[in-house]
Image: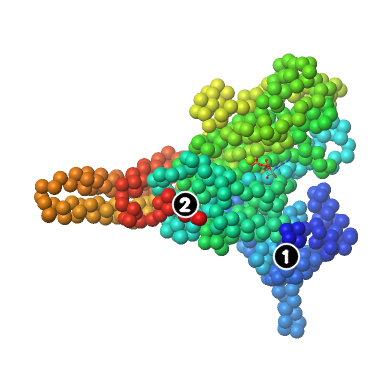
Amino acid sequence: MKTVPDYFGELVFDDRVMKATLSARTYASLRHTIDEGEPLDPNVADAVALAMKDWAVSKGATHFTHWFQPLTGITAEKHDSFISPSPDGGVIMEFSGKELIKGEPDASSFPSGGLRATFEARGYTAWDPTSYAFIKGKTLCIPTAFCSYGGHALDKKTPLLRSMEALNRQALRVLKLFGNKTVKRVVSSVGPEQEYFLISKEMYDARPDLRFCGRTLFGAKPPKGQEMDDHYFGAIKPRVAEFMEELNVELWKLGIMAKTEHNEVAPAQHELAPIYTTTNIATDHNQLTMEMMQKIASRHGLVCLLHEKPFAGVNGSGKHNNWSISTNEGQNLLSPGETPYENAQFLLFLCAVIQAVDDYQDLLRISVATAGNDHRLGANEAPPAVISMFLGDELNAVLEAIESDTPYKGTKKTQLKLGVDVLPKFNRDTTDRNRTSPFAFTGNKFEFRMLGSSNSIACANIMLNSAVAQSLKLFADELEGSDAFETDLHNLIRRTIKEHRRIIFNGNGYDNAWIKEATEVRGLLNFRTTADCMPHLLDKKNVDMLTSHRVFTPDELRSRRDIMLENYCKTVTIEANTMVDMARTLIAPAVSDFAAHVARGAQAKLALDPALPCRYETSLAAKLSALSDRIDSGVSNLERALIALHDVPDVVAESEAIRDDILPLMCELRVACDEAESITAKSFWPFPTYSDILFSVR
Ligand code: ADP
Ligand code: MG
């Protein structure tokens, strides 16, 4: 029997395959590009393409595609076959360096927010040699970036790579200040924990809202939800276990280190976490993981829901972005070191993150903003929409001691002097207790918990890398000229803690009192919806920062704001239309049928004995009838508001109308329908209920 090490990565053109199939010179040249970010030598491309094609064909591949991450949707691909006519009338399998490096997908229908006028030539995809090619089905997939001919990024990968480059540049400057002469590269790494729901396909097919929107738009609370906490880490049901087993095998073949899996808090909710890796690869892997989850679920008669809030009143799904930065020499820069000097360096990097999160709260909120995630942030299981940082008691005490020049208990009651004292090792058991914080330090990494389950992790990491690069840049600017490094370093750290202390909060992030304190006393931002935060992408301070590090151009930022808002508007509009349709053609008729049924029951009773009171029937029929009327007017109001959207001048105004008019009307309609569900006989209800769906998989 094949064991995991036998097949791990068998569908990946990884380092082992490269070494085995490329000449020593080609391999060395490619490795140089991968490890040090040097441009690829064009002569190398042909040799790599040939080896890649032979390898892929030997694994049964017939096609290749440039695989990329457009601004909406999971991933995009356009398959071309390797075949090429041969003079004898047959075919040969061919693949050139040119085809490897550059592709021209017919991409006119990918969102570009006005960057690629339709008359303009098509956009192109460019190979990202730092992420390995892999085989999916019969297709060799080549991870690529996607740009317009004007050089504008039309995808999520390009700015992510640029942000990693910015972080690398600035972190190297800072490391030099600490006398590190050997470090060549600094990269950020991510381990994303992915939550999802698994429900039976039968239930899914019976609900138009799930099919069109990925979430339920109606549904009364089930008698049993997650109150008992009996699902979290509970025994995994056999059908789910089979799904997870197959998912693991498929992910392992793709070189994805799926590591842990368990049930989550809500019924039918689960989580999968991989072992962390370099951010751009982690991003590719997470996209692939989401795709495989959906594909494999369907092989088991299941549907994997990646929506952030598939069921109201039940925990939603998020994605925890565990993020750290480390050197090519293996030093984790967010880990307190063994020597006083390393500790000072750690504290400076820590301060860089603290300042970044405080200065760019808005960008972090924007990076996770979608219509789906708006339902989750601020509900009582996810972090609030207000961003704050949790550092844990120990680290907090260290920072307090530095800020106030007072003795720190961990260092023999002496004053903590940077560069002299050794910090304690921060135990993750004591730091990981706070699950309510949006941004928590967990010993040697930060866990950004606001991401929605369907979000690409690219967006959050672009902002995180860039914002931290910016703090590091300011620090390096200040310290590079210093002739009293230790004193200036100490003062810089102390000042940063003082100036940004407001972002640190170690209490319960779900508490309403915190939201009040955060916004009214500390002046932190609280953007409830996508419509509220997205316009701030174009605030001057944000544009200045992101363009100065060459992560985005001003045009790219404008187009992204438009695309994200358009996406928000489209998502909610589809939901509203689906509600109108379901309420009108399924719910209202069912309620009315049931009312008629009840009335007929009363009539039949009265026919037996006109003196029978029929109180049950009369009052129920009256309630049902009142609810039908409410549903009917709810549908009309929503429909009218949807029509009014046509007159809104631009996408910003449209997103505001969605937030102020459409969403409240959807809420109203839902309340009436859910009330009707709770008093309508089960046999009359036109689709599966929450209980049916949530407990459907055994
Ligand atoms: P949990 O948060 O559920 O208790 P862990 O902390 O063990 O679980 O791991 C969560 C994720 O964090 C995993 O994907 C893991 O690989 C990742 N992780 C661990 N160390 C680091 C690190 N230094 N940098 C980035 N991610 C990390
Ligand atoms: Mg976690």
Tell me: 14 left or right of 71.
right
Tell me: 1 left or right of 29.
left
> Up-down: is 143 above or below 388?
below
Q: Earlier in the sequence, mark 1 or mark 2?
A: 1
For this orientation, the residue located farthest to the front is 235
Q: Could you give the CA–CA distance between mark 1 and mark 2, rounded to whole angstroms?
A: 35 Å
Residue picked out by circle 2:
695
Labels in figure, total: 2
In the picture, the quarter occupied by the N terminus is: bottom right
Residue 550: in sight, yes or no?
no
Residue drawn at x 70%, y 47% is 275
User: Callout 1, which amino acid?
Assistant: Met
Mark 1: which secondary structure? loop
Q: In the image, which disc is placed on residue 119?
A: none
User: Callout 2, which amino acid?
Assistant: Phe
Residue picked out by circle 1:
1
Tell me: 456 left or right of 253.
left
Among the 4 quarters of the image, the one containing residue 494: top right
In the rendering, at what x and y percent does residue 615 appear? 19, 44
Residue drawn at x 73%, y 58% is 4
Residue drawn at x 31%, y 55% is 684
For this orientation, the residue located farthest to the bottom is 88
Quadrant of ligand 1 in image? top right
Label 1: how many residues lie within 10 Å, few (<14), some (14-19) or many (20+)?
A: few
Residue drawn at x 55%, y 53% is 237
Query: Which one is nearer the viewer's eye here, 100 or 137?
Result: 137
Residue 686: in sight, yes or no?
yes
Mark 2: which secondary structure? loop
For this orientation, the residue located farthest to the left is 610
> Up-down: is 190 above or below 14?
above
